[in-house]
Image (tube, rainbow, N blue to C red):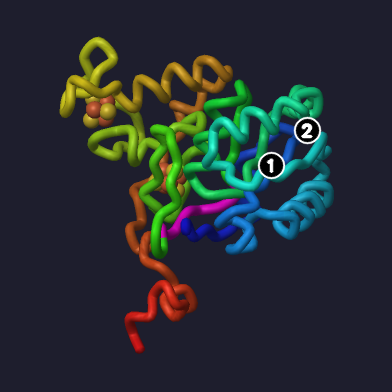
Amino acid sequence: MLFTKDKPLEEILESLGAESNIFLLACNGCAEVCETGGEKGLSTMKAAMEKAGKKVTGTDSVDFLCNKVLVATRLNREMDKIEQADSILVLTCGIGVQVVSKVVNKVVHPSANTISVGGLQGLWASDERCEACGDCALDYTGGICPITFCAKSLLNGACGGTHDGKCEVDSEKDCGWQLIYERLEKIGRLENLKKFHKARDHSKMFPSKDLRETSFYDIEK
Ligand code: SF4
Ligand code: SF4
């Protein structure tokens, strides 16, 4: 179970910028339970987007957005509506956003922050990982997580030690920031690299009091 919390609407609108045609995609798994995804999350977000003057080219939900095969199969039937959109706003956890960015050649935006992996973590047969940093940065990294794909979890570009596209910490692994660069180039968003991402606020990784009082965090009773 991955716990997610909606990003502030202002932050989502800022990340969408001048993009006016948006496709909404929600997860019916963990995100539905957290009410950041599912049908409820979709209808709330659709209303918010339209109120903000955006055109929603289509909406869809998938049972588990962390399942790459399922997502690719399901989105095939929506490709015409996705093609009309400038980007996809994905209502789910960091894993789901990464999966969508991998299967669709489109700009993706996370609508939520993943704040905790809670109890047992879901299983997914893919490379994507989320460290529940509480302040999802996938928006400006082209849907590749800088926290888990970079050995040093760097937020503002490569460390300078990469060699032939491999990480200086582990030469068996691709440099996460090389992958991010290639992805941004592919979707035409290299200008994202000029943005400065402020230092992480690690307190965002700590679950709120409400969440700690659920059965997963029954540690204070
Ligand atoms: S930036 Fe990475 S670790 Fe943070 S919420 Fe997004 S996917 Fe998870
Ligand atoms: S080589 Fe790349 S992945 Fe490795 S620590 Fe440096 S920036 Fe991160």
Q: Looking at the image, which is closer to me, 112 or 199?
A: 112
Q: Is residue 158 visible?
A: yes
* Position in image of residue 180 (x %, y %): 42, 25
Residue sitting at x 21%, y 14%: 163
The quarter of the image that holds ligand 1 is top left
Q: Could you say which disc has been placed on residue 72 in the image?
A: none
Instruction: Describe the element under mark 2 as helix, strand or loop.
Output: strand
Residue sitting at x 77%, y 34%: 20
Mark 2 crowd level (few <14, some 14–19, many ≥20, 10 Å Cα)? many
Q: Is residue 159 visible?
A: no
Give the prevailing secondary structure in the magenta stretch.
strand
Residue sitting at x 44%, y 80%: 213
The answer to whether residue 8 is left or right of residue 51 is left
Question: What stretch of residues is rendered in magenta?
Answer: 111-117
Q: Looking at the image, which is closer to me, 143 or 64?
A: 64
The answer to if 29 sits in the magenta stretch is no
* Position in image of residue 212 (x %, y %): 41, 76
Q: Is 4 drawn above or below residue 140 in the view shown?
A: below
For marks 2 and 1, give the one nearer the viewer. 1
For mark 1, what is the residue?
A: 25
Instruction: Describe the element under mark 1 as helix, strand or loop.
Output: strand
Q: Looking at the image, which is closer to me, 180 or 197?
A: 180
For mark 2, what is the residue?
A: 21
Task: Report the amino acid beneath label 2.
Answer: Asn
| Quadrant of the image containing the C terminus | bottom left
The answer to whether residue 27 is left or right of residue 122 is right
Q: Say whether mark 2 is within 8 Å of ligand 1.
A: no
